């Protein structure tokens, strides 16, 4: 005998911690009044709805909310079933859209781990934006290399002087991954950081320049969302990287020497960054 489909349901997460500092586990909450709309930023909304309806048998009405606790709620015991979604789902990837469709139409009995992880990640991003960490000072002048003149030369030669970013060597950490990120660019604060392992005698200048060029290319060619997936190293980015004349030589040097440079202890001592 087939299982009975759920007539209604919801998935709730607290968007921010309680005043006492504790955080509740996600629990069902009573339906509440909330701002809803039948349309949001055109393309994102219509793209989600088109993909969602490709996975469903019924003609669901989708309404978008900004509720701070109920991320998803649905009712199927009506002639026109209704699904309410938090706006974070507008660019959800296809697999997650299908998970939601399977849950509301009874092909799943619980929300998938993929849905829960997606919500938690978006909530954590919102928390970071609402409570940004204290902005640490960056120092571009290291023990061996000063990033500022290097940046200015690359900017003038390959980017027509259009790149704007704050530069600095990142701080050494006590616990380092075996293969650390040698550079990073933060869209939120417009900062480029390079790993201090590169600020050593024995690391060729063109190798440091290649990592700095890579991060500058991220400024020039921003990442984009394609069906819920962030693309950071697309075709345009790779084409820009080919403009760096010693790219293959730098990559080959890092492949052969990075492990040896990481084993040195000098770059871990204070003085490589502020």
Image (cartoon, rainbow, N blue to C red):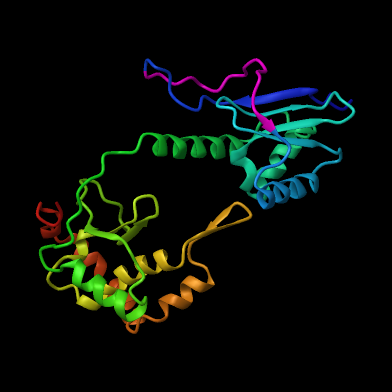
| The N terminus, quarter of image | top right
> What residue lies at 65% left-to-right and 47% top-to-bottom?
41
Between 78 and 155, the residue placed more toward the observer is 155
How far across and down, in percent of the image, does residue 132 sit? 34, 38
> What residue lies at 14% left-to-right and 59% top-to-bottom?
267
Q: Residue furthest bottom?
A: 245
How far across and down, in percent of the image, does residue 68 sit? 55, 27
How far across and down, in percent of the image, does residue 142 sit? 13, 62
Corner quadrant of residue 170:
bottom left
Left or right: where 132 falls relative to 270: right
Left or right: where 128 falls relative to 85: left
> What residue lies at 37% left-to-right and 75% top-to-bottom?
159
Look at the image and say whether residue 23 sits in the magenta stretch. Answer: yes
The answer to whether residue 105 is above or below residue 147 is above
How far across and down, in percent of the image, does residue 122 sit? 51, 39
The answer to whether residue 138 is above or below residue 83 is below
Look at the image and say whether residue 128 sits in the magenta stretch. Answer: no
The answer to whether residue 181 is above or below residue 103 is below
Highlighted range, magenta = 21-36
């Amino acid at each position: 005998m087939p299982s009975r489909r759920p007539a209604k349901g919801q998935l709730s997460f607290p968007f921010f911690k309680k005043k006492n500092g504790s955080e509740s586990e996600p629990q069902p909450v009573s339906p509440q009044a909330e701002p809803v709309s039948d349309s949001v930023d055109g393309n994102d909304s219509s793209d989600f709805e088109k993909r969602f309806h490709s996975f469903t048998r019924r003609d669901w009405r989708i309404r978008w909310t900004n509720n701070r606790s109920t991320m998803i709620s649905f009712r199927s015991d009506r002639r026109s079933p209704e699904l309410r979604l938090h706006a974070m789902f507008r660019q959800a990837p296809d697999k997650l859209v299908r998970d939601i469709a399977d849950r509301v139409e009874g092909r799943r009995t619980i929300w998938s781990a993929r849905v829960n992880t997606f919500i938690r990640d978006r909530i954590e991003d919102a928390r970071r934006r609402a409570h940004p960490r204290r902005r640490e000072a960056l120092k571009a002048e290291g023990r061996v290399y000063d990033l500022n003149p290097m940046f200015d030369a690359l900017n003038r030669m390959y980017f027509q002087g259009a790149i704007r970013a704050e530069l600095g060597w990142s701080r050494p950490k006590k616990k380092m991954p075996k293969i650390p990120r040698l550079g990073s660019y933060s869209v939120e604060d417009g900062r480029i950081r390079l790993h201090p392992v590169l600020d050593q005698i024995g690391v060729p200048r063109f190798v440091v320049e290649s990592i700095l060029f890579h991060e500058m290319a991220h400024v020039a060619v921003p990442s984009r969302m394609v069906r819920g997936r962030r693309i950071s190293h697309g075709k345009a980015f790779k084409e820009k990287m080919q403009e760096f004349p010693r790219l293959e030589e730098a990559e080959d040097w890092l492949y052969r020497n990075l492990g040896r440079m990481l084993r040195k202890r000098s770059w871990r001592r204070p003085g490589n960054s502020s």
